[in-house]
Image (tube, rainbow, N blue to C red):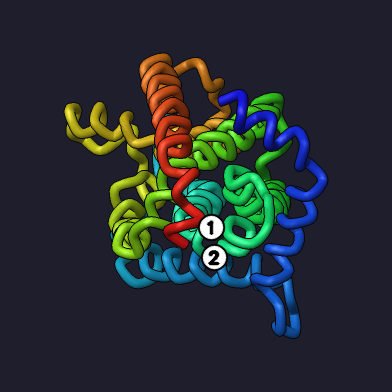
Amino acid sequence: MFTIFKEHRHFGKQIMLLAINDLKKTYKGAVIGPLWAAIKPAFTIFVYWFAFDVGIRSSGPVEWNGQIFERFIFMLVGFIPWFFITDSITLGAKSIRMNKQFVTKVSFPVSTIMTFTAIARLFVHLFLAVIMYAILLLYGYMPTVYNLQFFLYCPMMFMFFVALTWSTAPMAAFSKDFENMVVSIMAGVFWLSGIVYNSYDLGIDWLEKVMLFNPINFFVNGYRNTFIYNTWFYENEIELVIFLAEFLLVFAFGIFNYNRLRKTLPDVL
């Protein structure tokens, strides 16, 4: 753990420069450049809104705790953390293989590769969060003290999925099959998470309890608590305790896996 922190402390400036460079590479050659960071998510949200509100028409507004939320707003707030999460998982798993020159040709701490990849995604996430907040204001959701929880959920989300990539990125570098598996299961993970539905209100008691063990739900519900539910993070004690236990497990396993594999990565790559 201290080795990873030491690597980051001495390479802070390089990490930020590489994060910006990674973002530039993503949109290199595109006429409108970084605007694609907003266009692609906007199109995805439109497709789901059209499918659920226009095509199927059976899914009306979402009701929770005596409040009614428009389906578009409900999905919008759920999609914003999801875009960061899915990119962090898939691109994070690929990060070492995609940046193998830092492992094989230069003396550069491997752990920082996952960090600057996640920071690049974080820039996009913050941009989308600002757009989301502007839309919420247009729909009449006024600023509240609950909105400050964004500065809790966002850093926690960043740290959780960076810690996850300490395991997935080295394993994906060893096995292309593992990388493909991660990418493949993300479509299923989407439907197993409460992005387009309320995981608190499934109508099946045992299933609602099982959903509490999905860390993606913790962040999706956290953003809804912050921006539309007006609920404090500690009000659902069970969900919070489960997430903190999962965070410690992911953190510890990530350190173990990274230290176990990092010395052999140059030979594998």
22 over 249 or under it: above or below = below
Q: Amino acid at mark 2?
A: Met
**Residue 79 makes an appearance in the image:** no
Secondary structure of the residue carrying tag 1 is helix
Name which residue lies at 50% across and 36% down: 163
**Residue 34 makes an appearance in the image:** yes
Cβ atoms under marks 1 and 2 closer than 8 Å: yes
Q: Farthest residue to the front: give it.
A: 267
Name which residue lies at 78% across and 50% down: 14
| Camera-side residue of 9 and 225 | 9
Q: Position of residue 130 (x, y in %)?
A: 72, 50
Give me the disc on residue 23.
Answer: none
Q: Which residue is mark 2?
A: 98
Name which residue lies at 24% across and 31% down: 210
| Camera-side residue of 46 and 150 | 150
Secondary structure of the residue carrying tag 2 is helix
| Camera-side residue of 11 and 262 | 262
